[in-house]
Image (spheres, grey):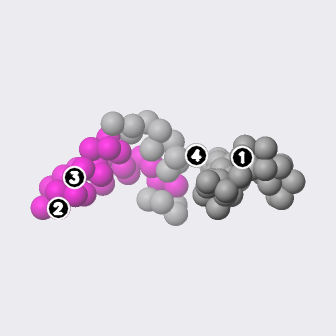
Amino acid sequence: MFTEREGERLPEWLDAVRQDDLPPIHTLAAGIDRDRDAVTAGLTLPWNSGVVEGHVNRIKMLKRQMSSRAGFGLLRKRVLFYS
């Protein structure tokens, strides 16, 4: 379903998960079900936000590294100048 972009199979997968005796997976299925349209689109459409997520991850890492060490000015310079 993930690698073949078969998002239309999501409802049958959710039904199979609900029939299993794994309560933590039931919680996951309930969360997916609340936003089913977005999850189906993510499993079906060829577009993704991987590049943007990579930049967000890098900025968060820089922020964690500089926690309690310097002010916003230095953090801003690191984000803008150290790509």
Residue drawn 47% across the image and 53% down it: 6
Label 1, label 2: how many angstroms apart (C-alpha)?
A: 46 Å
Please name which of the two marks, 1 or 4, marks the residue nearer to the observer: 1
Mark carried by residue 71: 1
Residue drawn 71% across the image and 52% down it: 70
Residue 17 position within the rendered picture, expressed as x and y whole percent measured from the top left: 23, 56
The residue wearing badge 4 is: 45
Label 4, label 2: how many angstroms apart (C-alpha)?
A: 29 Å
Give the amino acid type for the residue marked by disc 1 in the picture: Gly
Give the amino acid type for the residue marked by disc 4 in the picture: Leu
The residue wearing badge 2 is: 22
Q: Quadrant of the N terminus?
A: bottom left
For the residue pair 41 and 57, the one nearer the viewer reads as: 57
Question: Quick check: 77 above or below 38?
Answer: below
Mark carried by residue 26: 3
Please state if 51 lies on the left or on the right of 31 as rendered.
Answer: right
Which element is circle 2 on?
A: loop
Q: Indicate which disc, 4 or 2, sits on the residue closer to the N terminus.
A: 2
Q: Residues within 10 Å of mark 2 (few under 14, many from 20)?
A: few
